Amino acid sequence: MSEKTIIIIGGGIAGLSAGCYGQMNGFRTRIFEMHKKPGGLCTSWKRQGYVVDGCIHWLVGSRPGSGFHRIWQDLGALVNKTIIDHEEFGRIEAADGKTFIVHSNIDKLEKHMQEIAPEDGRVIAEFISAIRRCTRYEPPLEKAAEVSGLLDLLRIVFTKFPLLRMLWKWNKVSLRDFGLRFKNPLLRESFPLMFVPDFPMSFILLTFAWMHNRMAGYPLGGSLEFSRSIEKRYAALGGEAIYKARVAKVLTEEGRAVGIRLADGTEHKADYVISAADGHATIFELLGGKYLDDTIRDYYETLIPFPAVVYVALGVDRIFDDLPSSTGGMAIMLQKPVMIGGKVQSYLKAHIFNFDPGLAPAGRTLITVMIHTDFDYWQDLRVHEVQYRAEKEKVADTVIAILDKRFPGLAKQVEMRDVATPTTFVRYTGNWKGSFEGWQVTPKTWRFGRLMRKTLPGLANFYMAGHWVEPGGGLPAVAMSGRNVVQIICKKEKKKFSTTK
Ligand SMILES: Cc1cc2nc3c(=O)[nH]c(=O)nc-3n(C[C@H](O)[C@H](O)[C@H](O)COP(=O)(O)OP(=O)(O)OC[C@H]3O[C@@H](n4cnc5c(N)ncnc54)[C@H](O)[C@@H]3O)c2cc1C
C-alpha cells in the first residue's frame, strides 16, 4: 500500500507537531507556512544586535517527569537546551512601594504571603493547600479524548477523581474573583495581574505546582530557537516544510477535503488536510463558511479570544544583576492610570531578560512589555500610516517614562526600541483579532477539560489543530493538539499510533 499523504496548513507549534507525529506514523506530510520561518507565535526577531523574544515565558514540561516533557522529547524541542527555572514567578510592586513576591517555591510563597497579609491567613492556607495537591497532578495525555473509550474515561475518573473534583471547584473562580477574597489590598489587586483576569484559578494552581516542581522553565536561546529545534526534527523525520506559501483555499470534492490552493494559484493534493492555522480564517475564508453548524457558529459568536497585545521591546545598555530572574516579570502598579494605545492601563508588566545573555550584546539587557489592548483601535489606526507610526512611538515613549521612574537613568540607556501591535501579529501569524493564545478559558464561557471539536460538519478527511481548538492555548496544549489529530487519523486508518520511527 502506498503512503497516505497529509497536507498541514501552518508551521506554528501545532502544525510542526502534527507534521512530526504524522511522519512518525508513516504518513507523507507537507507543511505549507505563509511566513518565511517556522514557529508562528512562538518566535523571535532581530533588532539592532538584540533578539526580541516574542513568546516563551514558561514552558510546561521543560523537565523530565511529566507527560508534556515526553511530547517535547518526541519533537526534539529541547535537544541541547539549557533550562532556567526561575526562583520567582514574578513580583507585583504597588504604588506605595509594597511588593508581593510570587515565589516559585510554595513554602517560601506561603511564608511571604502570611507575612504581608496575616489578616488573610485562612484564604492563603486554602490557596497554598490547593497548589500542594496539584503538585501530584499529572494530566491524562497519552490518548486523545476523541479516540478514548468508556474504559479510558473510567480509568481517569477512578485514578484522578479527588483532584479533578477539586480542580472543578477552582474552575468556577476567576483570578479576579479570587483576589476579592483578600482583605489585604496588595494581594487583592495582585491576583488579577497574574495572568488574564478572567481566567479560572485552576490554571494558576496548576502553573504554580509545575513551577514548584521545576517543570515549567525557560529554554535559553528563546522562542525561535525552540521552534527551529522542532523544525529540525521534522526535517530529520523526512517531512517537507514549504515557506512563503500562503494557503488561499481548502479544496473539497463531494464532502471530502482533497488538498489546497495557494495564493499563487498552485494546487496540491493529499489524502488528508489538517489546518493548524487561525480557526476563523480556516472556517470562514479557506472553506468559505460552507461547513458550519450551530455548535461551530456558536464558538465564533460567543467565546472570547485572548486579548490583543501591544508588545514593546527595549534594548538597554545596562544589566540588572540586583534583580532575581523571573517567569512573568515585574508588574509595576501606577500611581495614576495612563492611556496606552487607546486603553487605560493601571499597571505595566516588564519582563527583564537578565537571565538570557543570548538575547542582548554583552553588558546589555532585553526588556519586553506586553500590554493588553483593543484590537479595533489598532486596526482602525493601521490605515493611517502616519498616525499609526506616531502612536507606536507614543506607546514606546510612555513605557520608557514609566520604566525610567522605576529604574532611574534607564531612558538614556535605551538603544533599541521596537513596537509590535495587534496588526503586526495578524500580518505575521493571521491570528483572529490579534489574539495571542486563541480562546480564553473563563468560568463563564469555557472550562478546562471541556473538549472542542476538531472536525467540521459535512467535511471528511479534514481536521483542525492548534490553539483555536484547544481553549486556553499555550505551547504544550497545541503540541498535544497536533499529536491528537494524528492519533485520530491513525485510528481512521486502523494504524497503531507510534511515537518513534
Ligand atoms: C507574547 C506571547 C507570549 C506567550 N507566552 C507563552 C508562554 O509563556 N507559554 C506558552 O505555553 N504559550 C505562550 N504563548 C502562547 C503560544 O505562543 C500559542 O498558544 C501557540 O504558539 C499557538 O500555536 P499554534 O500553532 O496553535 O498557532 P500559531 O502560532 O498562530 O501558528 C499558526 C501558523 O499558521 C500560519 N498560517 C496562518 N494562516 C495561514 C495560511 N493561510 N497559509 C499558510 N500558513 C498560515 C501562521 O503564519 C502561523 O505560523 C504566548 C504567546 C504570545 C503571543
Image (cartoon, rainbow, N blue to C red):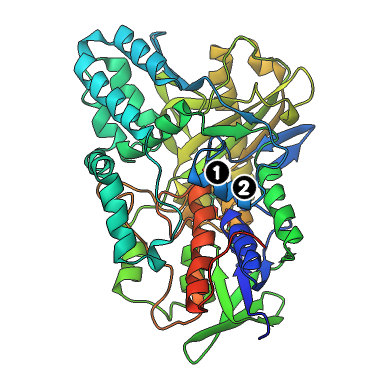
Task: Find residue 337 and report its horizontal and vertical position in percent.
Answer: 40, 24
From the top left corner, tell me how far across and down residue 101 is, in percent: 43, 16
Q: Nearer the viewer, residue 158 or 234?
A: 158
Question: Ligand 1 closer than 8 Å to the CB at disc 2?
Answer: no
How crowded pointer 2 is (Cα within 10 Å; few <14, some 14-19, many 20+) is rated as some
Quote the CA–CA distance across marks 2 and 1: 6 Å
Helix, strand or loop at mark 2: helix
Q: Compared with residue 93, is residue 497 higher up or lower down, i.e. above or below?
A: below
Residue 380, x across and y down, in percent: 50, 53
Residue 136 location, quadrant = top left
Say which of 77 and 499 sits in front. Answer: 499
| Residue at 33% from the left image edge and 56% from the top image edge | 303
Residue 164 image offset from top left, x and y in percent: 27, 44
Q: Is mark 1 within 8 Å of ligand 1?
A: no
Secondary structure found at label 1: helix
167 in relation to 316, above or below:
below
Q: Which mark is residue 69?
A: 1
Residue 116: in sight, yes or no?
yes
Identify the disc placed on residue 73: 2
Q: Amino acid at mark 2?
A: Gln
Whether residues under marks 2 and 1 lie with C-beta atoms below 8 angstroms apart, the answer is yes
Looking at the picture, does residue 465 appear above or below residue 463?
A: above
Local crowd size for mark 1, using a 10 Å CA cut-off: few (<14), some (14–19), many (≥20)? many
